[in-house]
């Protein structure tokens, strides 16, 4: 029996306990409207975007029908999204795809004050504080240097002197044009648009993952909620009511989980989705990942991940205590990490045990010789 036959038998005999789906919002209208841009309601889901998430809902129903009741109740599925209209509408489209018709769906969306991914300047000032250091690095300066080449024309587009935030806003608008395959306005050249879009993604990456602290601060809430749900499913499967959790976010949200798992986190298309499945095989619990109609290998743990290993991977990159997370978010000063103390203490501890071992051995030899002489 070869490796793939073993994996197939493992998949076939395992019991599916729980599924978390993490996806990007569907195609949407411009996040922000400028005088020169399309004039439309900002951040609304387009018909194409609705259809994208409706189809995800149908896929969920087809693949995970044993976890879903035929009629919608709030106790059946947990659906959470970012606070934008396009995110909430994407979640509702998925639920409509699952149940075949609209209900009064309950969507839990993140309050702006708690939105670490999308409003870091309000929700977690330390992310911005750390960002100011990362923007001094050579990689970002190279991108910003190419932005400054087009400074005059970009100032006209944003209606102000350019900075990292209004270029980020402009980038989100141009990404919407690109995703919807709409030609860029005459007011901006293709070269300018591509440079701004590159800066948009680079800034997003630097904002969230410019340092280890930033990554933890930006993704902690989402990852801890995921682990809490999985742990509940492992420890108390008989009490588990909601066996399907749906999370819908924007680029940053989806990029976060992909990056944490060591997967390709380059820009992805709207309505991209990753399904994280929890299976029980005897006394073991395994995590599997489904994307684009097939199970995929994850660099962190392969095609199948032991739940304890998955828990370790996520936990080591996040805070266990919410209070610790909140406290650090509002700490705008350097936190001294006394590495020299750690290493010095480790050195003295090693020397202490080495000396005890060495002289205890010599003492034993000396005592042995004394008894031999007597």
Image: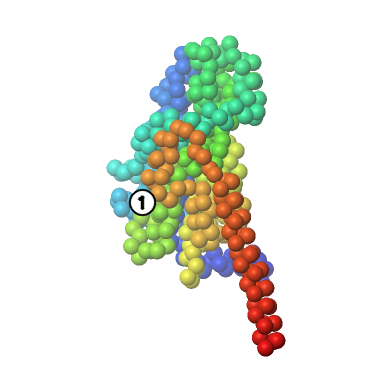
Residue nearest the observer in this picture, 367 or 66 = 367
Residue 15: x and y, percent? Answer: 46, 65
Q: Report the quarter where the N terminus lies.
A: bottom right
Q: Is residue 61 above or below residue 129?
A: below
Image position of 237 with respect to 58: above or below: below
**SS type, badge 1:** strand
Neighbour tally class for label 1: few under 14, some 14-19, many 20 plus, Cα within 10 Å: many
Q: Residue at x 61, y 20 (%)?
A: 147
Q: How many marks?
A: 1
Quarter location, residue 81: top left
Q: Residue at x 33, y 53 (%)?
A: 76
Q: Nearer the viewer, residue 168 or 24?
A: 168
304 relative to 208, above or below: below
Which x, y percent locates residue 217?
47, 40
What x and y, as percent, mark residue 372?
69, 87
Is there any visible trace of residue 262 in the rendered image?
yes
Left or right position of 283 against 299: left
Q: Name the residue at the front extreme.
A: 374
Q: Position of residue 244 (x, y in %)?
A: 40, 53
Residue in the picture at 65% in, 80% down: 367
* Location of mark 1 (residue): 77
- Among the 4 quarters of the image, the one containing residue 327: top left
The residue nearer to you, when weighing 210 against 19, is 210
- Quarter of the image that includes the C terminus: bottom right
- Most extreme residue toward the bottom is 374
**Does the rendering let one see residue 204?**
no
* Residue drawn at (42%, 25%) of the image: 42
Q: Quadrant of residue 83?
A: top left
């Amino acid at each position: 029996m070869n490796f793939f036959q073993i994996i197939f038998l493992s998949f076939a005999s395992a019991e599916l306990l729980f599924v978390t789906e993490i996806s990007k919002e569907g195609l949407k209208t411009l996040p922000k409207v400028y005088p020169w841009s399309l004039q439309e309601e900002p951040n609304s889901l387009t018909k194409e975007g609705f259809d994208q998430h409706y189809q995800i809902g149908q896929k969920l129903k087809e693949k995970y029908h044993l976890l879903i009741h035929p009629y919608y109740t709030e106790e059946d599925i947990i659906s959470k999204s970012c606070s934008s209209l396009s995110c909430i509408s994407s979640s509702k489209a998925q639920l409509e795809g699952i149940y075949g018709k609209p209900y009064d769906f309950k969507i839990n969306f993140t309050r702006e004050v708690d939105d670490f991914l999308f409003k870091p300047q309000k929700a977690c000032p330390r992310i911005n504080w750390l960002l100011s250091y990362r923007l001094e690095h050579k990689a970002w300066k190279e991108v910003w240097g190419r932005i400054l080449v087009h400074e005059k024309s970009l100032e006209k587009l944003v209606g102000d002197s350019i900075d990292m935030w209004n270029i980020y806003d402009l980038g989100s608008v141009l990404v919407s044009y690109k995703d919807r395959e709409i030609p860029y306005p005459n007011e901006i050249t293709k070269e300018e648009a591509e440079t701004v879009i590159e800066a948009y993604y680079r800034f997003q990456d630097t904002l969230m993952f410019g340092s280890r602290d930033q990554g933890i601060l930006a993704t902690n809430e989402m990852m801890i909620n995921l682990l809490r749900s999985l742990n509940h499913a492992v420890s108390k499967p008989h009490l588990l009511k909601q066996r399907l959790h749906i999370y819908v976010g924007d680029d940053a949200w989806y990029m976060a989980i992909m990056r944490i798992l060591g997967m390709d986190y380059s820009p992805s298309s709207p309505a991209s989705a990753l399904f994280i499945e929890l299976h029980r095989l005897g006394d073991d619990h395994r995590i599997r990942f489904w994307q684009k109609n097939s199970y995929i290998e994850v660099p962190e743990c392969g095609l199948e991940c032991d739940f304890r290993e998955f828990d370790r991977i996520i936990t080591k990159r996040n805070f266990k205590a919410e209070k610790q997370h909140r406290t650090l978010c509002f700490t705008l000063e350097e936190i001294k990490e006394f590495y020299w103390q750690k290493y010095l203490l480790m050195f003295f501890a090693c020397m202490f045990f080495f000396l005890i071992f060495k002289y205890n051995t010599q003492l034993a030899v000396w005592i042995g010789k004394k008894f031999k002489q007597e």
